[in-house]
Image: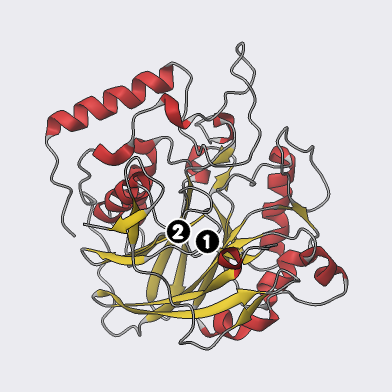
Amino acid sequence: MSTLDLPSRILLAVTSAVVAFALAGFALGDPSSSEKGVAVAEEGSSTVVDEASVPSLADMPAVHPPAGATPTPNPLAPPVTIAFGGDVHGEPPIEDVLLAGDNPLDGVADWLSAADIAVVNLETAIGTIGTPADKTYTFRADASLADALADAGVDVVNLANNHGLDYGHDGAEETVRVVTDAGMAAVGYGEDADAAYAPEVIDVGGRTVAVLGLSRVFPIIEWEARSTRPGMASVYDLDRAVAAVRDAATMADHLVVTVHWGRERMTCPDGDQLAMARAFAAAGADVIVGHHPHVLQGVTDLDGTLVAYSVGNFVFYAKKDEQRDTGVLTVTLGEDGVEGYRWLPARIDDDGSPQPLPETADLLPETLTAVPGGDGCAPIG
């Protein structure tokens, strides 16, 4: 893949700006989110994530490919297929489905199970312990949600998002235990930064795939993992996120990045999503799949990296039609990287469950980007 062609002076300027703001105690954020923040106060209190406090990522510094030798895929190993779903929680009416002993993913289970690996964004705590965070929406699901995901064919869940610590670290640690007990892997959260930024590496018939979870949407910056603090893998720390992508690219034949980003209810990616996608692609990602906007966004190719900016809701309450549109994105990876993808459309029903549609319906939209200073979208380029 080609690197981003930006002069080194931009690297110095942007890096300096980010460091300066970080030292000042500010952070990046998503102003469209309905989450309630906590005011900046004395040391020891929480620091609100505030988008306006930092520069845009539109002038992202140059990112260089992995310096170490990346694995050479086994030419005798068959291609691997990876299925992606969007945001999942267990709030009512999904809770009612689970408590009735039914699986809200039954409608798409065949699609997920048919893939070698299936990945979703788990946007809830799972279990019974922990204290709810001081925010408008806190999600917690019954442990049966983990069993339902596993039974439907899900292999990896991303915990790096703006609900991963809804019930604190006790809740997040219980979620990891419940998820792993159900036979799945959890990425994006850990006991320290090294653990949070570590990918899950899966071997499928001699072809290895690393799955890395990241988020650029937190209600407070304290949710970010540090060297001596548990938390989530954060794109607010740009250097660490890009380094994690670069490192993960050296651990497997292929690298998938699942990332929580963007603005809610925006049907086109913003400039920051475009910049982060370019950076992650240059650092070695083969596939980048986004979530958080709660609507579908487009799919594009960046020098061989497949980018799906948002795959929307998946198992989620949704009232508006555009928030009900969903599906399963299945990507095929082979010796030369991405060999193709298939979009299997679905629509979320009144029970919060995705139900298949004809494959000709509701294809992912043309990849668009937000118009600077406006509310509309325009073609990228």
Up the image or down, 192 lies above or below 79; here it is above
Where's the C terminus, which quadrant?
bottom left
Q: Mark 1 and mark 2 in contact? Answer it, CB < 8 Å.
A: yes
Judged left or right of residue 149, residue 66 is left
Judging depth in this view, the residue of 353 and 112 nearest the camera is: 353
Mark 1 neighbour density, 10 Å: few (under 14) some (14–19) many (20 or more):
many
Q: How is the image coloured?
A: secondary structure
Q: Position of residue 379 (x, y in %)?
A: 28, 60
Q: Position of residue 219 (x, y in %)?
A: 59, 35
| Residue at 66%, 82% in the rendered image | 107
Judged left or right of residue 304, residue 179 is right
Label 1 residue SS? loop
- Counting residues from the start of the chain, the first of labels 1 and 2 encountered is 2
**Amino acid type of the residue that numbered disc 2 sits on in the rendered structure:** Thr
Judging depth in this view, the residue of 237 and 260 nearest the camera is: 260
Up the image or down, 374 lies above or below 330; here it is above
Q: Position of residue 178 (x, y in %)?
A: 73, 58
In the rendered structure, find residue 267 and report the number of the disc placed on it.
2
Judged left or right of residue 33, residue 202 is left
| Residue at 67%, 72% in the rendered image | 150
Q: Position of residue 171 (x, y in %)?
A: 74, 45
**Amino acid type of the residue that numbered disc 1 sits on in the rendered structure:** Val
Mark 2 neighbour density, 10 Å: few (under 14) some (14–19) many (20 or more):
many
Q: Measure the C-alpha gap from mark 1 to mark 2.
A: 6 Å
Q: Quadrant of residue 360?
A: bottom left
| Residue at 43%, 28% in the rendered image | 52
Most extreme residue toward the right, as rendered? 100
Residue, disc 1: 295
| Residue at 34%, 29% in the rendered image | 55
